[in-house]
Image (spheres, rainbow, N blue to C red):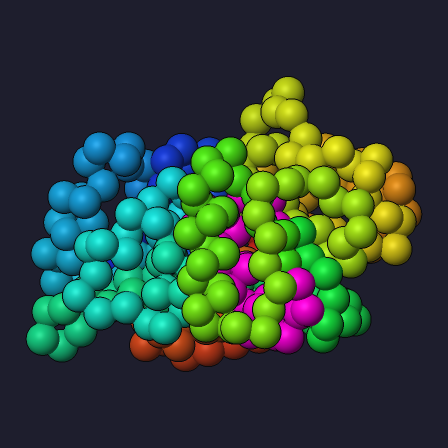
Amino acid sequence: MKITGTTALIAHIGFPTHAFKAPMIYNPWFEKAGVDAVVVPMSCEPAHYPAFLRAVFLLANSRGALVTMPHKVSTVALLDEASPTVRIAGACNAVRRSADGKLQGDMFDGEGFVRGLLRKGCVLSGVRVLVVGCGGVGSAIAASLAQAGIGSITLFDARPESADELGARLKAHYPALVVTTGSNDPAGHDVVVNGTPLGMNEGDPMPMDVSRIAPEAFVGEVVMKSEMTAFLKAAQARGCRFQIGSDMLFEQIPAYLEFFGFPSTTPEELRAVARLSY
């Protein structure tokens, strides 16, 4: 694609960046649609992130930032204005600068994840859900699943306080939702979600005991290092329906584009031009 002095910059900030897939989707679409913009991976360690995020928006041609692990939770405290979804999830994955210079944040992971499940025919009304991993992406998915009308949710995180705090926020906004924390046992759940980074690196342990997942359950993944992670392969072997990590990304990109002020598109158009590699 052609980059000129007028090209708008979208920073894709995370650490590490080796599993990033967004540039392989956005940039081919920008090229096809004639949009003068580019998504650039930026590897930033947590200690430098607060100063770096502010520095990104000192650039006059900066249109926004895609925020990913491990910065989604810490971004919230850096915002001047946060959407309701950000406040519920306690995490943010999209930042833009308003006309008066304020940093505004929103969160689209959960919306993309839920759109993908519904498109695949997964019924969410009244179902029992397990979300393992209550960081940025897991919290957003939990919030959007609650909005979609699930009946109960079990939350687990290696840091128990993260699960407890997310559970309290969910109960405050959805009083009828049954919330439990402290177990990653998938038995008895209709929808099971890996919201952790486990699977990004060779030899990572499973996020849960896959042998306890019911074959009738729907399994969701957020890791995009490979299309079929070890977790998804194990769930597939049990006969489960599933959603790969990049599906969540394709489903949420139209919302991102609108947030940043670009023309929108559809997941199908994005898939047609994407140049994904694993």
Task: Kindly indicate the quadrant of the structure image that contains residue 233.
Answer: top right
Q: Nearer the viewer, residue 176 or 213?
A: 176
Query: Looking at the image, which residue is at 32% across and 77% down?
Result: 261
| x and y, in percent, of residue 249 in the image | 54, 58
Residue 190 higher or lower than 40, as above or below: below
Q: Do we see residue 21 in this rendering?
A: no
Query: In the visual, does 43 lie left or right of 129?
Result: left
Query: In the visual, does 186 lie left or right of 248?
Result: right
Query: Looking at the image, which residue is at 64% across and 35% down?
Result: 207
Query: In the visual, does 47 lie left or right of 42?
Result: left
Quadrant into which the N terminus falls: bottom left
| x and y, in percent, of residue 199 in the image | 61, 33
Q: Do we see residue 74 in this rendering?
A: yes
Q: Nearer the viewer, residue 10 or 201?
A: 201
Query: Looking at the image, which residue is at 60% across and 53% down?
Result: 180
| x and y, in percent, of residue 158 in the image | 51, 34
Q: Which portion, as a residue range, is magenta?
A: 131-152
